[in-house]
């Protein structure tokens, strides 16, 4: 029979959240606003792309697919963060923790793959404009998006399955704001297998990030080479403006992800771990709808048009009453 101190842990307690009620509420309010904005902003982009026939192009198809993934990427963690901020115990079950890790990483990896596909789309549009309409067909767009999601949802499965077999018999205080591989692995009963697994997880993340970064980098090398050969300044500006939103999102997302997952043996304090986690799990998704709506003329004009139509309908309804 196992002694009490060797019993398997069935729940984890998040220890990175503020302890006082006042601090929790002061974190809860802006986080709730950010989450609401992320869901609403991305739904607006998806709706606008669907409602406007002139936006039924590969670039906007990928943007709406990215918006869809962003909603689920943030939903994997933020609702639980909000609940934990208002809860005294701030706990999550072992199975709940495994599910959160799976959906957070599967949607995140799907986004990484989709951003890579979007770079390929921009490369074809600028470097091979004559063949672009026949190459980047709606069918190919759907196939690329589906492949990104399949890759995203399969890649984390071996890690999640392996972690689910580990015994957690020590402290159940998780030094993070949501379940992630390294904080959870540190709570496993210490053995050489867990240490090896931490190193394997580091290497897997490094390969994923570096591969995607290199593919996107090579796409932009080709794009820049073509843009520099355009004679008119207006032509160069117009060509590059179609890439700026994607490039901004890529740098924002990958920069924060690299800080978190390309650390290898380096360790940060709990404060900096939390700051970096918030940056790529909350702030990057928060800025994405802003970047794609403010930096993209077509989407911005479509939003203004539908907003104007909504206001006209509202005033007409009000007058009829």
Image (spheres, grey):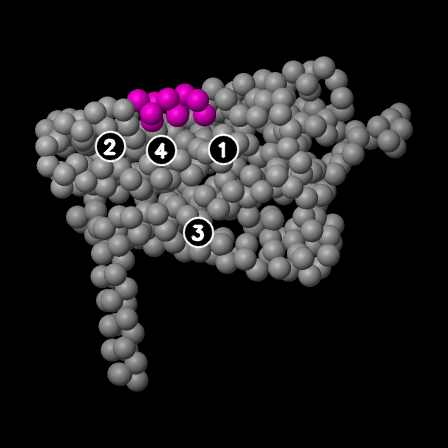
**Which tag, 3 or 4, sits closer to the chain's start?**
3
Q: Secondary structure at mark 2?
A: helix
Residue at image location 50% in from the left, 58% down from the top: 33
Real-space CA distance between mark 2 and mark 4, rounded to the nearest whole angstrom: 11 Å
Q: Which residue is mark 4?
A: 115
User: Foreground residue, 181 or 274?
Assistant: 274
Q: Is residue 126 above or below residue 45?
A: above
Spot occupied by residue 73 in the image (x, y as percentages of width and height): 48, 41
- Which of pointers 4 and 1 lies earlier in the amino acid sequence? 4
Q: Give the class, few, some or many, for how many residues have Cα within 10 Å of label 1's Cα (few <14, many ≥20).
A: many
From the top left corner, tell me how far across and down residue 139 is, in percent. Answer: 23, 32
Residues at circles 3 and 2 in contact by the CB criterion of under 8 Å? no
Please give the range of residues in magenta.
Answer: 209-218
**Mark 4 packing: few (<14 Cα in 10 Å), some, or many (20+)?**
many
Q: Earlier in the sequence, mark 1 or mark 2?
A: 2
Q: Which residue is mark 1?
A: 257
Query: How far is disc 4 from disc 1 in space, using C-alphas?
Result: 14 Å
Q: Residue at x 72, y 30 (%)?
A: 187
Q: Are marks 2 and 4 in contact (CB under 8 Å)?
A: no
Name the element at disc 1: helix
């Amino acid at each position: 029979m196992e002694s009490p101190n060797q019993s398997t842990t069935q729940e984890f307690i998040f220890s990175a959240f503020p302890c006082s009620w006042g601090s929790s509420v002061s974190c809860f309010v802006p986080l709730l606003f950010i989450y609401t904005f992320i869901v609403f902003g991305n739904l607006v982009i998806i709706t606008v792309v669907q409602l406007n026939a002139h936006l039924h192009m590969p670039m906007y198809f990928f943007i709406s697919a990215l918006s869809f993934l962003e909603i689920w990427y943030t939903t994997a963690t933020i609702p639980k963060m909000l609940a934990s901020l208002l809860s005294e115990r701030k706990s999550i079950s072992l199975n709940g923790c495994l599910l959160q890790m799976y959906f957070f990483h599967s949607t995140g990896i799907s986004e990484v793959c989709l951003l890579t596909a979007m770079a390929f789309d921009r490369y074809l549009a600028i470097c091979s404009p004559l063949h672009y309409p026949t190459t980047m067909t709606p069918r190919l767009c759907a196939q690329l998006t589906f492949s990104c999601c399949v890759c995203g949802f399969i890649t984390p499965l071996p890690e999640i399955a392996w972690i689910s077999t580990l015994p957690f018999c020590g402290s159940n205080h998780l030094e993070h704001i949501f379940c992630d591989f390294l904080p959870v692995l540190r709570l496993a009963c210490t053995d050489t297998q867990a240490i090896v697994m931490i190193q394997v997880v580091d290497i897997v993340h490094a390969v994923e990030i570096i591969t995607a970064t290199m593919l996107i980098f090579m796409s932009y090398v080709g794009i820049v080479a073509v843009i520099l050969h355009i004679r008119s300044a207006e032509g160069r500006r117009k060509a590059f403006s179609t890439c700026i939103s994607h490039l901004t999102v890529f740098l924002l997302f990958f920069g924060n992800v690299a800080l978190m997952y390309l650390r290898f043996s380096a360790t940060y304090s709990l404060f900096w771990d939390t700051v970096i986690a918030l940056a790529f799990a909350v702030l990057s998704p928060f800025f994405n709808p802003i970047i794609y709506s403010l930096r993209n003329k077509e989407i911005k004009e479509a939003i203004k048009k539908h907003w104007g139509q909504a206001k006209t309908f509202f005033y007409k309804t009000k007058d009829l009453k």
